[in-house]
Structures are given as structure tokens and as C-alpha cells.
Amino acid sequence: MNRLTYIVLILTAIFAPWIATHDVTAQNLIMRYSAPTAEHWFGTDSLGRDVFSRLVFGARISLEVGIIVVAVSSFIGTIIGSIAGFYGGFVDKFLSGYLFNVFLAFPGLLLAIALVAFLGAGLNILIFALCVIGWVGYARVMRGQVLKVREYDFVQAARALGASNMRILFTHILPNAIQPLIVQASLGMAGAVLSEASLSFLGLGIPAPAPSWGTMLEEARGLDTLYSAPHVFFFPAIAIALTVLAFNFIGDGLREYLDPKQRKR
């Protein structure tokens, strides 16, 4: 089920212009809050826009944010965490003892809210804010892995043979320390999608009329809408829940597959 949801999300994001049945910005006030029909499969919102089409293009936004945030955060975290774990001493004390703790001292979502509120809303600002709060997790994972792998016999043998630090780090240590980062990246995708939806719901994410799932939830909030037109709230909420659940399940599956002990079971 989780794999199917993941595949559907990717295909929906790629083929969104061909899957969507209506223009996501086209308004029809006469049809506002219309229930699901043959013309509007998931009904319409407060401005008469097709919910299904906006949901389809929202998948593209969520996937774009997730991929970019995970790619940038994991790259920065891998570099910083590897340096901290490999060199140790003062370098490790400064990076893991001070720099990591400074970022971890602030709640991630609150720091992102502060950055977006200060710099202004927008897709690029949102991605930047999520990268600022996201790289520390990857750095901590990579630091721990490098600290373990650097003591292996084959690493000590390479050092005894006169290999340079960069060769040891990039040729011998990183390939053997990267597995937990793959799992972290899958779970990070779920966190990025949820954070984007949260910031958009608060009005600090992607501004309207972009069809973000969080923005759709923000537009649908209120008891009147919940009782009179529940489809406006229901479908974006289900899309977010299934997407986050799928990435979490994939992360758990990768953890079991990459762990030899779990794989034997």
C-alpha cells in the first residue's frame, strides 16, 4: 500500500498537467462549495475552483519541496558531519558541541516560521528555511557513522599505506557510512512535506493562488465549512496523511532492508 501511494504521488506530480481536469486558478463563484459531481470529482472550494485539479498540482509542489530540501540538507549535513567525525578533537567539539547544539536549541518549525516571517513568503524562501532546520539531523547521523567506520581495520590499513585523508574519507569511509543516511532521507521527505503544509496553513508558505495542500486546508478551516462542505477539508488532509505515511513506511522498509540482522529475520 505504501509503495503504491508513493508511485501514485510521483506519477501524479509528473503528469499533473494531463491528469488535472480543470485550470487550478479558474474561478466560478456560482459553483462555490459544490459537492463532488461527475464534472468536479472532488467538488469545488470557496471560489469555485476544482479541488481535484488543485490537489493534483499540490502533489507536484509537495514533491518538489521534499526532494530539494532533502537533497540540499543531506548534502550539507553529510559534509559537515563527515568532517566532524573524521577529524575529531577541536573540529568535532566546535561542530557537534557548539554548532549542532545552537540549531537544535531552537524548535525546528518555530525557527522556520521566524525565517519565513523575516524574509517573506515564497517557494524559494520556504525551501531555504526548511534546509536551515533540516541539515543538522543528517549531520548528526553522518558524524556517528564516520566515528564508527573510521576505526575499522580496512580504514586503518589504508592510513598505514599512506592514503590521504580525503581519499580515506571519500573512498573508504563515506561509502560504508551512507546507508543510515538513505533511511534518514526517506523520513526527511515526510518531514519536509509536513513542514511545507504546516507553513502554508499558517500563511507563511507558498502564497495563493498556488495549489499547496496546506493552503487548501487553511482556506477550508472553520466550522461552517467543515459541516457544509467537508470535501474541501477532507481531500487535502487525506493527501497529506497518505503521503507522510508512505514516506515513513518506505523509511522503515529501507531500515529493515539495509540492516543485515533485520533482513535475516
Image: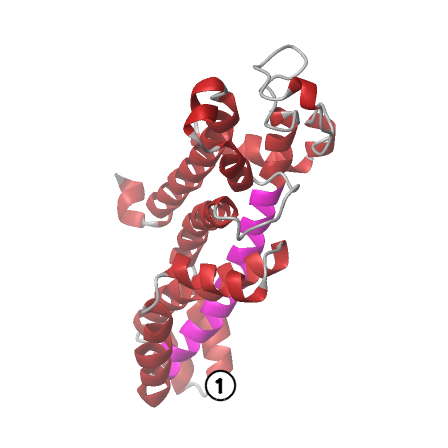
Kind of residue indicated by mark 1: Ser
Q: Residue furthest top?
A: 38
What secondary structure predominates along the stretch shown in magenta? helix
Tell me: 229 left or right of 181: right
Q: Would residue 83 be counted in the magenta stretch?
A: yes
Q: Nearer the viewer, residue 172 or 46?
A: 46
Residue 128 versus residue 13 in the image, above or below: below
Q: Residue at x 33, y 89 (%)?
A: 90
Residue occupied by mark 1: 164
Please report the residue visible at 54 percent of the width from the left and 38 percent of the height from the top: 213
Q: Secondary structure at mark 1?
A: loop
Residue 95 picture location, percent across and down: 37, 80
| In this picture, residue 88 sits left or right of residue 39 | left
Q: Is residue 177 magenta?
A: no
Q: Which residues are magenta?
A: 61-87
Q: Quadrant of the N terminus?
A: top left
Q: Position of residue 158 (x, y in %)?
A: 42, 80
